[in-house]
Every structure is written in C-alpha cells, then in structure tokens.
Amino acid sequence: MGKYSVSEVKAKVIKVRMPVEEIGLFNSLIDGLPRYALTRTKEKGKGEVFVIATPYKVKELMEALEGMKKHIRKLEILGETNEYLTF
C-alpha cells in the first residue's frame, strides 16, 4: 500500500457565532442548501461554528447566512477566518 500524498484543498472558511442551543437548527439549514457548505465546530459548548464552503459559492452562502439571521437568534457572521482546522 502506497503512502498518501498531502494535497491542497481550496475552501473558504466562514466563522459564525450563535447560542449553543441553536447550532442543530443552523446545521440543518446549511445541510438544506444545494451543496454550498459543510459545518464544523472546534470546541464543544462555545457556540462558534466554522462553515466550510467552496470558493465558487461563497456569495450565495453569505446571502443565505444573512437570511438565516431571521430564524436563528443572535446569529453573528464573524467573517472569513484562517484558523487551522483538523478533522
């Protein structure tokens, strides 16, 4: 079996903040979008979510996030981040 090479993945990571109890609804709303993004949390119980998006759909994703503010109380879009994420 050969070794796997590390390849560069191009994605935009948008950081958002909300009350912890709203994260499930937020994840469901993101999953309902037509393959715009995935969500990940870095620390349990902190209320910060990383939205990992293809660079080609960032505009549409940002519009969707703005619309979600009507449904998720205290949703804050903190913007693009360069934080290191491990999976």
Image (spheres, rainbow, N blue to C red):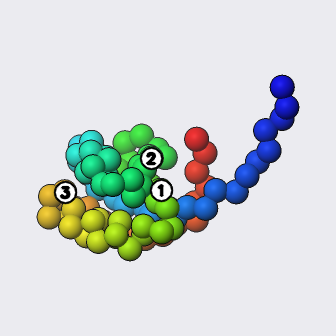
Q: Amino acid at mark 2?
A: Arg
Residue tagged 1: 52
- At horizontal 47% and vertical 56% (from top left) the residue drawn is 52
Q: Amino acid at mark 3?
A: Ile
- At horizontal 64% and vertical 56% (from top left) the residue drawn is 9
Precedes in sequence: disc 3 or disc 2: 2
- At horizontal 45% and vertical 47% (from top left) the residue drawn is 40
Do we see residue 64 in this rendering? Answer: yes
Q: Secondary structure at mark 1?
A: strand
Q: Callout 1: few (<14), some (14-19), or many (20+) C-alpha neighbours within 10 Å?
A: some
- At horizontal 32% and vertical 47% (from top left) the residue drawn is 31
Residue tagged 2: 40
- Position of residue 73 relative to residue 79, above or below, is above
Q: Amino acid at mark 1?
A: Ile
Do we see residue 48 in this rendering? Answer: no
Q: Secondary structure at mark 3?
A: loop
Q: Residue 87: horizontal and vertical position, in percent?
A: 58, 41
- For the residues labelled 2 and 1, say whether their Cβ atoms are less than 8 Å apart: yes
Q: Residue 71: horizontal and vertical position, in percent?
A: 15, 58
Q: Quadrant of residue 86?
A: top right
Q: Callout 3: few (<14), some (14-19), or many (20+) C-alpha neighbours within 10 Å?
A: some
As measured in the structure, the alpha-carbon distance from the residue carrying label 1 to the one carrying label 3 is: 19 Å
As measured in the structure, the alpha-carbon distance from the residue carrying label 3 to the one carrying label 2 is: 17 Å
Q: Secondary structure at mark 2?
A: strand
- For the residues labelled 1 and 3, say whether their Cβ atoms are less than 8 Å apart: no
Taking depth in this image into account, of 14 and 38 the one nearest to the observer is 38
Taking depth in this image into account, of 51 and 57 the one nearest to the observer is 57
Q: Quadrant of residue 63?
A: bottom left
As measured in the structure, the alpha-carbon distance from the residue carrying label 2 to the one carrying label 1 is: 8 Å
Residue tagged 3: 72
